[in-house]
Image (cartoon, helix red, strand yellow):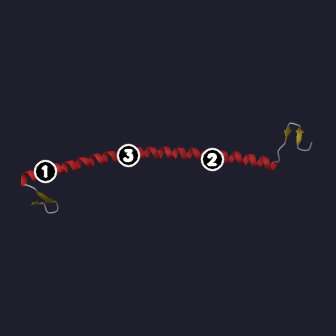
């Protein structure tokens, strides 16, 4: 029995042992990378949540400004009649 200690056990070669060690190292490295990726995704999702909140706030602000503009133009129309405002010159041009 050259590599056998008994009929049920066989000593693997040094190359095979090295291959097992390398496989384990590769598994550990891959699992570590998977954990790092998970944490990166978690942080990006948190940032995305924050950006979505800012986006919602800015959309509401824009809608409010649009409403104020419409009310302003409606006031001008009631005061001066139908027409258009030239914001650069401050002139209201009647239809």
| Residue to which mark 2 is pinned | 30
> Quadrant of residue 85 in the image?
bottom left
Which residue is farthest left? 80
Which residue is farthest bottom? 89
Q: Regarding mark 3 in the picture, which secondary structure is present there?
A: helix
| Residue to which mark 1 is pinned | 74
Of label 1 and label 3, which has the lower sequence position? 3
Q: CA distance from mark 2 to mark 3?
A: 32 Å
**Relative vertical location of residue 85 with respect to residue 22 in this rendering, above or below:** below
Image quarter where the N terminus lies is top right
| Residue to which mark 3 is pinned | 52
Q: CA distance from mark 2 to mark 1?
A: 64 Å
Classify residue 67 as left or right of residue 38: left
> Where does residue 30 sit, x and y in percent of width and height?
63, 47
Q: CA distance from mark 1 to mark 3?
A: 33 Å
Classify residue 83 as left or right of residue 29: left
Crowd band around label 3 with a 10 angstrom C-alpha radius: few (<14), some (14–19), many (20+): few
Of label 2 and label 3, which has the lower sequence position? 2
Classify residue 87 as left or right of residue 37: left
> Where does residue 87 sit, x and y in percent of width and height?
16, 60
Of badges 2 and 1, the one in the foreground is 1
Q: Regarding mark 2 in the picture, which secondary structure is present there?
A: helix
> Where does residue 43 sit, x and y in percent of width and height?
47, 45
> Where does residue 83 sit, x and y in percent of width and height?
11, 58
């Amino acid at each position: 029995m050259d590599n056998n200690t008994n009929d049920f056990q066989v000593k693997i070669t040094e190359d095979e042992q090295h291959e097992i060690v390398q496989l384990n190292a590769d598994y550990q490295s891959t699992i570590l990378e998977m954990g790092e990726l998970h944490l990166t995704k978690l942080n990006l999702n948190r940032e995305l949540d924050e950006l979505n909140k800012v986006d919602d706030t800015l959309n509401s602000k824009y809608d409010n400004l649009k409403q104020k503009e419409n009310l302003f133009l409606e006031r001008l129309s009631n005061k001066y009649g139908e027409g258009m405002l030239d914001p650069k010159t401050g002139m209201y041009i009647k239809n």
